Image: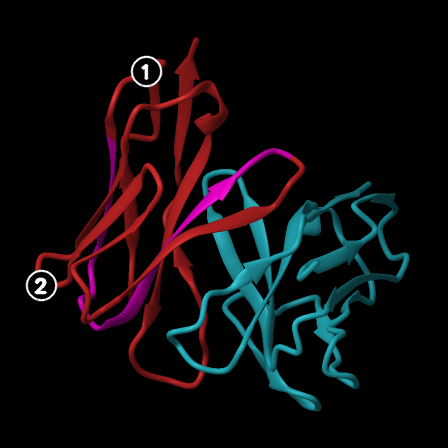
């Protein structure tokens, strides 16, 4: 059974700092990995999707990497801002079966202090 | 604007009173699914649908029903809600294909007394 773990569970940083969020998964038979942001009352917003054949994806100040063989992904946020404060979730989709079910980690609560 | 909408956003009800949470998407997506999010347990899939009239169970389907009569709509039905169904519910959709990004609705917070 696939399990996804995110460390740390919570992180507090001063504005402007670069930071890394970690995600690990137990079964390397994934098709892709997706990073989401969750804001209270606003649902989940997709940030980046990395296919299993890719090593990284970038969007603005965000960079996500994937090492499928070791079961790890990182989300790098450059020059953090208070508006980045949210819960960040990573999720994987298995490479087999007929369901596109996302298996989520429990998230990292990020607070960026002005 | 491309989006997934859910209604209601907040709901307080009593045990046994049937309710429906609606989900609608305007992106012509074939795949839709429902998740519930609980503290300490994260997000878990309840049901999913690959297309109209094609639905199947996820990890936690007990106590829920779904239907997919139209491509854009995927309602979640609680025939006889119980307090253990108090949760935050999310609907998601995507095009067919594991490479496709999944888009989530804003969530429905349900309290069953």
Foreground mark, 1 or 2, reads: 1
- Compared across the picture, whether B59 is left or right of B82 comes to left
Against B94, residue B13 (above or below) is above
* Chain cyan in the figure, letter: B
Residue nearest the viewer, comparing B57 with A11: A11
Residue B29, how many percent across, how many down?
62, 77
Which element is circle 1 on? Answer: strand
Total number of numbered discs in the rendering: 2
Q: Please give the name of the residue rendered at 21% of the width and 73% of the height, measured from the top-left corner.
A: A29
Q: Main secondary structure of the magenta part?
A: strand
| Shade of chain A as shown in the rendered figure | red
Badge 1 sits on which subunit? A
Q: Quadrant of the C terminus of chain B?
A: top right
For residue A22, side relative to residue A10 (left or right): left
Q: CA distance from mark 1 to mark 2?
A: 30 Å
Residue bearing mark 2: A69
In the current view of this chain or complex, which residue is farthest to the front? A60
User: Looking at the picture, does residue B48 appear above or below residue B24?
Assistant: below
The stretch in magenta equals A20-40
Q: Is residue B6 left or right of residue A20?
A: right
Q: Residue at coordinates 67% horizontally, 37% vertically from top-left?
A: A41
Chain for numbered disc 2: A
User: In the image as oriented, which residue stretches furthest toward the bottom?
Assistant: B53
Residue B33 in the image, given as x and y percentages of width and height: 60, 70
Which residue is the site of mark 1?
Answer: A13
Residue A13 seen in the current view: yes
Judging from the image, the colouring scheme is by chain
């Amino acid at each position: 059974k696939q399990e996804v773990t995110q460390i740390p569970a919570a992180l507090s940083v001063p504005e402007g700092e670069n930071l890394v969020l970690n995600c690990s998964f137990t079964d390397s038979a994934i098709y892709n990995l997706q990073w989401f942001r969750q804001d209270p009352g606003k649902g989940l917003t997709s940030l980046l999707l990395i296919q299993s054949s890719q090593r990284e994806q970038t969007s603005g100040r965000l960079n996500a990497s994937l090492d499928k063989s070791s079961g790890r992904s990182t989300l790098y946020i450059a020059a953090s801002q208070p508006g980045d404060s949210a819960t960040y979730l990573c999720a994987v989709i298995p490479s087999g079966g007929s369901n596109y079910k996302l298996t989520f980690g429990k998230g990292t609560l990020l607070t960026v202090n002005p | 604007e491309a989006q997934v909408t859910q209604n209601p956003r907040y709901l307080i009800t009593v045990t046994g009173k049937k309710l429906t949470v609606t989900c609608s998407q305007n992106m012509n997506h074939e795949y839709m699914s429902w998740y519930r999010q609980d503290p300490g347990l994260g997000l878990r899939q309840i049901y999913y649908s690959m297309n109209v009239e094609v639905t199947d169970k996820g990890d936690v389907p007990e106590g829920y029903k779904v239907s997919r009569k139209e491509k854009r709509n995927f309602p979640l039905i609680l025939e006889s809600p119980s307090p253990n169904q108090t949760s935050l519910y999310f609907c998601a959709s995507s095009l067919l294909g594991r490479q496709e990004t999944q888009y989530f609705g804003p969530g429905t917070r349900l309290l069953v007394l």
